[in-house]
């Protein structure tokens, strides 16, 4: 904004390099340029100051698609002053000669005109296609169309304004329409999620079934092996019992044979001994018995021999050789 100082009957104006100052005197341009510094008399001067930097304005337009669905467009439009003297003649940029402030609102007027042209171009573009096609195309197609329309508009060129760029941040339907458009996609995604969940559950059930079958097969195999082990142990026990019985039978047979041999030999010896004693006279047998008895007695305190016993024994001893010879 220009700085104005008053010194008595004259004033000094000092402007910035980004500002274009036009001084009028009696309706004619006396000075025009950027960053000017000059003296003037407030009673006879009229001064306009125009911004020469690039400006951006916010754009918000609501329209309808060809199928009568509401859409909202948000973005910004960049513009700058292309011909300051022409613009100064069409829009009032005059400033107060005491404070350097604009007397009106020239920027708002320019942006209102640009906004009206942009709204018209946006609404025409939206009305040419259904809402789904517009949303699928996105804001880029609309941005290109809008920038071309503003750049070619003769009304802006006539007042000395040039559009330098258009940026669109969003092309969105109403909330109700957005929810309606999202529903099929949401349902499809939800269906895929449900299918994935069901697939995971089915896979988990299949894995659990495989695990259960594996466990059952393992238990069956262990039971079969245990049955075979028990049968083998029983067979081994039977084989051991049979072996022990056979060994005991053989041992019993051997013991019986030994007993028979011993008893047979003992019986034969006893028979021979009996046969040897069978023909001996009674007296001799009695003497042998007495001898055997005496051998088993530890002490003999008294022995009584009568004459009758002695005569009988002696008679038998004399008869023994005769009987032996008679045989």
Image: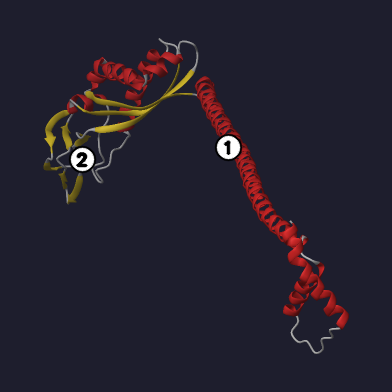
Instruction: Decide: is 40 above or below 155.
Output: below
Instruction: Decide: is 284 above or below 169.
Output: below
In the image, is 35 to the left or to the right of 150? Answer: left
In the image, is 228 to the left or to the right of 291? Answer: left
Picture quarter containing residue 54? top left
Q: Secondary structure at mark 2?
A: loop
Residue beneath the point at 64% across and 53% down: 258
In the image, is 98 to the left or to the right of 31? Answer: right
Where residue 106 appears, x then y in whole percent? 30, 32
Say which label, 1 or 2, has the lower sequence index: 2
Instruction: Decide: is 18 above or below 28.
Output: below
Residue beneath the point at 74% across and 78% down: 296
Picture quarter containing residue 97? top left
Q: Residues within 10 Å of mark 2 (few under 14, many from 20)?
A: few
Q: Secondary structure at mark 1?
A: helix
Q: Nearer the viewer, residue 72 or 270?
A: 270
Distance Cα–Cα, label 1 vs label 2: 123 Å
Q: Nearer the viewer, residue 123 or 324?
A: 324
Residue beneath the point at 27% across and 29% down: 78
Q: Are marks 1 and 2 in contact (CB under 8 Å)?
A: no
Where residue 251 appears, x then y in whole percent? 63, 50
Residue at numbered disc 2:
43
Q: Is residue 284 visible?
A: no
Residue at numbered disc 1:
225
Q: Residues within 10 Å of mark 1 (few under 14, many from 20)?
A: few
């Amino acid at each position: 904004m220009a700085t104005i100082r008053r010194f008595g009957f004259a004033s000094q104006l000092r402007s910035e390099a980004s500002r274009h100052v036009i001084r009028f005197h009696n309706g004619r341009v006396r000075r025009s340029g950027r960053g000017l510094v000059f003296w003037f008399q407030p009673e006879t001067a009229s001064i306009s100051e125009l911004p020469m930097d690039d400006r951006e304005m916010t754009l918000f337009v609501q329209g309808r698609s060809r199928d009568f669905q509401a859409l909202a467009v948000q973005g910004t439009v960049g513009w700058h002053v292309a011909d300051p003297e022409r613009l100064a003649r069409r829009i009032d940029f005059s400033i107060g000669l005491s404070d350097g402030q604009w007397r009106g609102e020239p920027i708002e007027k320019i942006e209102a005109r640009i906004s009206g042209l942009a709204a018209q171009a946006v609404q025409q573009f939206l009305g040419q296609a259904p809402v789904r096609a517009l949303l699928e195309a996105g804001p880029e197609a609309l941005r290109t169309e809008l920038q071309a329309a503003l750049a070619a508009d003769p009304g802006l060129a006539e007042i000395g304004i040039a559009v330098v760029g258009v940026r669109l941040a969003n092309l969105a339907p109403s909330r109700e329409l957005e929810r309606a458009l999202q529903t099929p996609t949401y349902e499809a995604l939800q269906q895929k999620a449900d299918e994935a969940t069901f697939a995971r559950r089915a896979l988990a059930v299949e894995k659990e079934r495989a695990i259960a079958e594996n466990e059952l097969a393992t238990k069956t195999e262990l039971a079969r092996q245990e049955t075979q082990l028990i049968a083998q142990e029983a067979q081994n026990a039977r084989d051991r019992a049979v072996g022990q019985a056979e060994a005991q039978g053989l041992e019993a047979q051997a013991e019986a044979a030994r007993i028979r041999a011993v008893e047979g030999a003992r019986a034969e010896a006893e028979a021979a001994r009996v046969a040897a004693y069978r023909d001996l006279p009674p007296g001799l047998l009695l003497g042998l018995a007495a001898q055997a008895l005496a051998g088993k007695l530890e002490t003999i305190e008294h022995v009584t021999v009568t004459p009758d016993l002695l005569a009988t024994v002696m008679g038998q001893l004399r008869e023994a050789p005769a009987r032996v010879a008679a045989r």
